[in-house]
């Protein structure tokens, strides 16, 4: 189920984003970005609608997915 990221508190959204960018195997290409830069990139992608926040009721977990 899609969750509007604007429904989350700033702290909750940051927690979801931090968990996402800290996952092993997340590919940012050949350029190294700082943790804060990665967080800002994800926020920007949420704002532009390139990615969305989804909640899986079965696993009780959130994820950020690319909008196709």
Image (cartoon, rainbow, N blue to C red):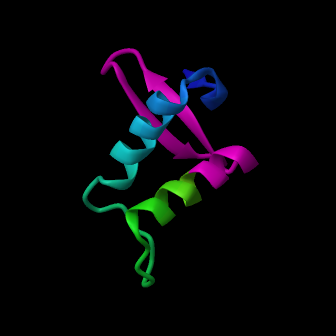
Q: Position of residue 4 (x, y in %)?
A: 64, 26
Give the quarter of the image for residue 49.
top right
- Outermost right residue: 48
**3 sits to left or right of 57:** right
- Outermost bottom residue: 30
Question: Could you tell me which quadrant the N terminus lies in?
Answer: top right
Q: Position of residue 14 (x, y in %)?
A: 46, 39
**From what the image shows, is residue 16 above or below residue 57?**
below
The residue drawn where x is 40% and y is 70% is 34
- Outermost left residue: 24
**67 sits to left or right of 65:** right
Q: Nearer the viewer, residue 14 or 50?
A: 14
**40 sits to left or right of 16:** right
**From what the image shows, is residue 17 above or below residue 12?**
below
Q: Is residue 52 magenta?
A: yes
Q: Position of residue 17 (x, y in %)?
A: 45, 44
Give the quarter of the image for residue 30.
bottom left
The residue drawn where x is 36% and y is 61% is 26
Q: Position of residue 8 (x, y in %)?
A: 56, 24
Q: Is residue 33 magenta?
A: no
**62 sits to left or right of 25:** right
**From what the image shows, is residue 22 above or below residue 47?**
below
Marker count (numbered):
0
Which stretch appears magenta? 43-68
């Amino acid at each position: 189920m899609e969750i509007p990221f604007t429904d989350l508190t700033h702290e909750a959204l940051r927690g979801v984003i931090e968990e996402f960018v800290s996952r092993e195997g997340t590919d940012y290409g050949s350029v190294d970005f700082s943790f804060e830069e990665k967080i800002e990139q994800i926020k920007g992608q949420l704002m532009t609608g390139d990615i969305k926040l989804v909640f899986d009721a079965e696993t009780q977990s959130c994820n950020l997915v690319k909008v196709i």
